[in-house]
């Protein structure tokens, strides 16, 4: 196929590469990370016990809890002077997940992202407008690194700022748009509103970070005049965005199986599901130096796509992310857990433990409202000031704004079963 970045590996070559990577990762983690060494010793395992890919099933799992316990630099497996960067994302509690990177990790990541641009049909003459978050988040850095490595022109605008986005889109003639699906819709409607459809040269979109409906995708493809758009996957723990991309055949997401092993397991039994069945993605990195992952439970639900892909690429595929085995929600590209909301509310003695999160989407933009009850026996005076203080605390902790409403004690619905904490009215 004449690819510059995408590997063309036979099943045997891939298995050979995976086994070599697995042996290296296990040896590296055992020798350099006390947390991993302890897990292995507790199970009576030594690095030499990994002789085939089947031995992966004998290895211990890694979870979000391991990242939390190792905070601020969890699973660190290199000397600190070899760490050139950190990135972070929201965790299930107040502590965020912080991951360290060596220069080799950064190079691996930019290569993965370059593969995504290649698979999406970009060339070095493309102008790529990047409209995702920069800074601690992996998104902006990953899209930019990969674009520069690929050799296309990078237009690093970041999120929001619709006026500037539309101006750059028109004046600089961006051909590829990288954003969340919500942002793509927002920009599409803005382009339409300003009558700029004829002045926009976009050909394709690469989007991710949140679920989207086919209807939403059709709308922004039509309004922006896109020839095609592609769903991208990734997570901070496994470098960041770019761990796989949908191809032009739109029959699943090709993932970089030469760089990590993907297992699809039953979240309850932690045994492999039957081929094609939905389960939890569990990932093992094959060359990650600073913070290697061994059987990391992502909590993302998907399934493997069987057979060969019509696009001709021989790398395996998984379906789009179908949800989570826990209850994470994504608001404007930021991961939010109900537990994080509860943690913020718990800081206010004036409030009870009963709350409900309501998610809505207006004109392509996500809004989060939090309804919470006053503590029992507490008078209603000062509700507005209290709601404002809670809202500010949420913005600071979760990095997403919420409209907070303080209600009378007993006003929210009660149940003997699990309370329905999240009402997602965005679909």
Image (cartoon, helix red, strand yellow):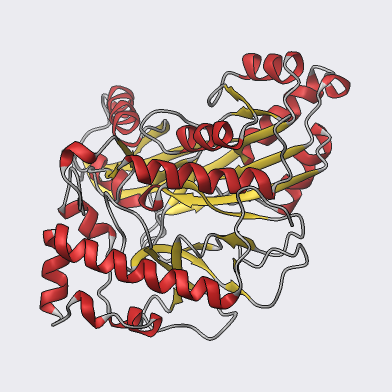
Q: Going 21% across and 74% down the picture, which residue do you hit?
A: 47
Q: Going 67% across and 33% down the picture, which residue do you hit?
A: 177
Picture quarter with the N terminus:
bottom right
Q: Going 79% across and 40% down the picture, which residue do you hit?
A: 221
Q: Going 42% across and 79% down the picture, which residue do you hit?
A: 266
Position of 196 relative to 343 (above/below): above
In this rendered view, identify the residue nearer to me: 275 or 393: 275
Tell me, yes or no, if residue 227 can be seen here: yes
Q: Residue furthest right?
A: 198
Residue 15's spot in the image, x, y percent?
Answer: 49, 75
Residue 244's spot in the image, x, y percent?
Answer: 56, 55
Position of 312 relative to 2 (above/below): below
Tell me, yes or no, if residue 262 can be seen here: no
Q: How many marks?
A: 0
Q: Quadrant of residue 198?
A: top right
Q: Quadrant of residue 166?
A: top right
Position of 402 relative to 21 (above/below): above
Residue 65's spot in the image, x, y percent?
Answer: 22, 59
Is residue 209 found left or right of 171 in the rendered image? Answer: left
Residue 394's spot in the image, x, y percent?
Answer: 32, 33
């Amino acid at each position: 196929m004449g690819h510059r970045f995408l590997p063309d590996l036979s099943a045997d070559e891939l298995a050979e590469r995976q086994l070599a990577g697995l042996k290296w990762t296990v040896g590296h983690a055992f020798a350099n990370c006390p947390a991993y060494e302890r897990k292995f010793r507790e199970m009576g395992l030594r690095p030499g016990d990994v002789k085939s890919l089947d031995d992966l099933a004998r290895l211990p799992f890694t979870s979000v809890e391991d990242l939390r316990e190792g905070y601020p630099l969890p699973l660190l497996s290199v000397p600190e002077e070899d760490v050139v960067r950190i990135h972070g994302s929201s965790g299930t509690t107040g502590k965020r997940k912080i991951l360290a990177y060596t220069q080799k990790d950064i190079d691996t990541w930019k290569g993965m992202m370059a593969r995504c641009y290649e698979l999406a049909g970009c060339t070095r003459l493309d102008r790529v407008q990047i409209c995702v978050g920069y800074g601690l988040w992996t998104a902006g850095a990953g899209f930019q690194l990969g674009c520069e490595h690929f050799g296309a022109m990078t237009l690093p605008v970041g999120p929001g700022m619709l006026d500037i986005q539309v101006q750059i889109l028109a004046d600089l003639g961006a051909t590829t748009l990288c954003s969340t699906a919500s942002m793509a819709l927002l920009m599409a409607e803005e382009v339409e509103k300003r009558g700029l459809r004829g002045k926009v040269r976009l050909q394709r979109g690469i989007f991710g970070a949140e679920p989207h409906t086919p209807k939403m995708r059709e709308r922004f493809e039509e309004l922006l005049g896109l020839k095609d758009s592609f769903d991208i996957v990734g997570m901070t723990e496994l470098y960041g965005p770019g761990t796989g991309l949908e191809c032009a055949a739109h029959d699943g997401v090709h993932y970089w199986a030469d760089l990590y092993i993907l297992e699809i397991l039953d979240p309850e039994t932690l045994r492999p599901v039957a081929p094609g069945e939905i389960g939890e993605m569990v990932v093992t990195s094959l060359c990650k130096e600073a913070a290697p992952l061994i059987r990391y439970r992502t909590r993302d639900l998907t399934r493997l796509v069987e057979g060969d892909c019509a696009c001709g690429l021989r790398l395996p595929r998984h379906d789009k992310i179908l949800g989570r085995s826990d209850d994470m929600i994504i608001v404007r590209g930021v991961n939010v857990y109900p537990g994080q909301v509860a943690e913020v509310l718990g800081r206010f003695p004036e409030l009870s433990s009963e709350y409900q999160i309501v998610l809505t989407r207006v004109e392509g933009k996500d809004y989060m409202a939090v309804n919470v009850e006053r503590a029992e026996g507490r008078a209603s005076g000062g509700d507005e000031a209290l709601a404002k203080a809670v809202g500010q605390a949420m913005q600071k902790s979760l990095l997403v704004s919420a409209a907070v409403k303080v209600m009378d004690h007993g006003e929210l619905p009660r149940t003997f079963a699990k309370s329905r904490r999240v009402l997602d009215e965005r679909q």
